[in-house]
Amino acid sequence: MANQAPRSDSQPDDSARTAEFEARIARGETIEPKDWMPERYRKQLVRMMSQHAHSEIVGMLPEGNWITRAPNLRRKMALIAKVQDEAGHGLYIYCGTETLGVDRQELIAQLLDGTAKYSSIFNYPTLSWADIGCIGWFVDGAAIVNQTMLAKASYGPYARAMVRICKEENFHKRQGYEIMATLAAGTPEQKAMAQEAVNRWWWPSLMMFGPHDADSPNSDELRRWGVKKKSNDELRQRFVNLTVGQAKAIDLTLPDPELRYDDATENWHFGPIDWAEFWRVVKGDGPCNRERLAARRKAHDDGEWVRVAAAAYAAKQRRSSEAA
Amino acid sequence: MPDSHDETLKTQGATAADSQWPLWEVFVQPPHGEPHEHAGSVHAVSAEQALENARDVYARRGEAVSLWVVPSSAITASTPDDMGPFFDPGNDKPYRHPQFYKVPRGVRVV
């Protein structure tokens, strides 16, 4: 296929090619599907991009939970459009991953059989309408910080998918923040609901950026190869710095007693993250891990008749055009 | 539809119901007279379905006035190994560029 990489075979004499590859990255050149790349670069990208695509797809579930119960038609239309965008984002990134010589089908099979990971944030439940606001504000806000960096990634198809996604993601964040601002300015009960959602989503949102740099095994390599341009901790700090003022503006409190502005670093200092919780959720023991996978498997199985019907229709069309 | 795609459908064999449909490359033309640009790809059983999927995936916000879908297998592309020799004929012809030509002193616009 024109746009796909040959599966590169790793030979012992690859060191010269690897040096040339790394020199290209150092010069800021973009790596394209048919270019030579170290097998490890290809593998890391397949892992990272497919996890990213799966996250977009699984991310539809917690929000889909509230489509039928959105408080009015305006909110409902916005939420449907947002969930549709997430499906689109998943497809952009699957398409980018396929340029590395894997099939989307393989990737989806890995998601459904539980061997592939996706962002642990989507293993938390959406208990109230305010959670939909929090997902847009925090989760999409964090995703924008991460994806803005990835839009400069060294692998062309990944970077281009990110540019496309970033353009659309701002609507997601603003619709979420508008929900929170409206609730926070509402009745005492509505404001309490907004604050309660903030309390539950804040820390898992900070965990979205992954382990601290010192504990992040893949980070060094991904940075050396220009896939990531900033570290997990730098991105997390940027997200905190952006969000503190937004919370203040709508009079909601971020649940961290240690949160304070540090004049020396010009950053908002935040308290310790509960990494035991992070690893528990990553390893499959979050509140909704089983439910999310069960929902994906059911959707895949329930969609089978559509795939069968489309294939049968295409075959019939071909037969009638051959007969004609 | 080219034969190769019928083959793709057939070779996916036993799990046909669960198989991956052929891949199509999508080209989107934005408004205001710009050329079609590669946007990404979609899987689809037919050209018609590929167009519909491309619309849903790559044109949700009025980005397009026109879409092309092309079976990926129908595209012939240059390879990175060709790069030097393949593009060489163009590289040693500086007289194709305006800077090659001298302009008398004092003349600003030619």
Image (cartoon, coloured by chain):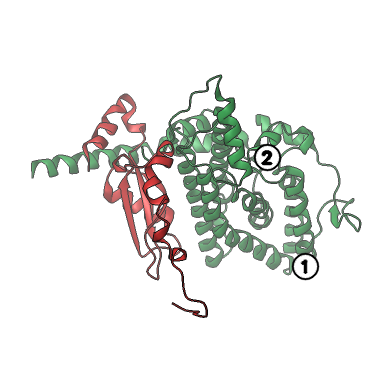
Chain colours: A green, B red
As drawn, B22 above or below B105? above
Residue beneath the point at 35% across and 32% down:
B19
Image coordinates for residue A36, horizontal then vertical, percent: 50, 33
A283 vs A74: above or below: above
In percent of width and height, residue A272 lies at: 85, 42
Residue A213 rendering spot, x and y as whole percentages: 77, 38
Q: CA distance from mark 2 to mark 1?
A: 35 Å
Chain identity of mark 2? A
Q: Residue at x 61, y 63 (%)?
A: A175
Q: Is residue A11 left or right of residue A219?
A: left
**Amino acid type indicated by mark 2:** Arg
Query: Would you say A164 lies left or right of A175 here?
Result: left
Q: How packed is label 1: few (under 14 Cα within 10 Å), some, or many (20 or more)?
A: few
Picture quarter with the N terminus of chain A: top left
Question: What residue is disc 2 on?
Answer: A223
Is residue A145 at least partly visible in the picture? yes
Residue occupied by mark 1: A249
Residue nearest the observer in this picture, A68 or A150: A150
Disc assigned to residue A290? none
Q: Chain of mark 1?
A: A
Q: Amino acid at mark 1?
A: Ala
Q: Tell me if label 2 and label 1 are in contact, CB under 8 Å.
A: no
Q: Is residue A115 visible?
A: no
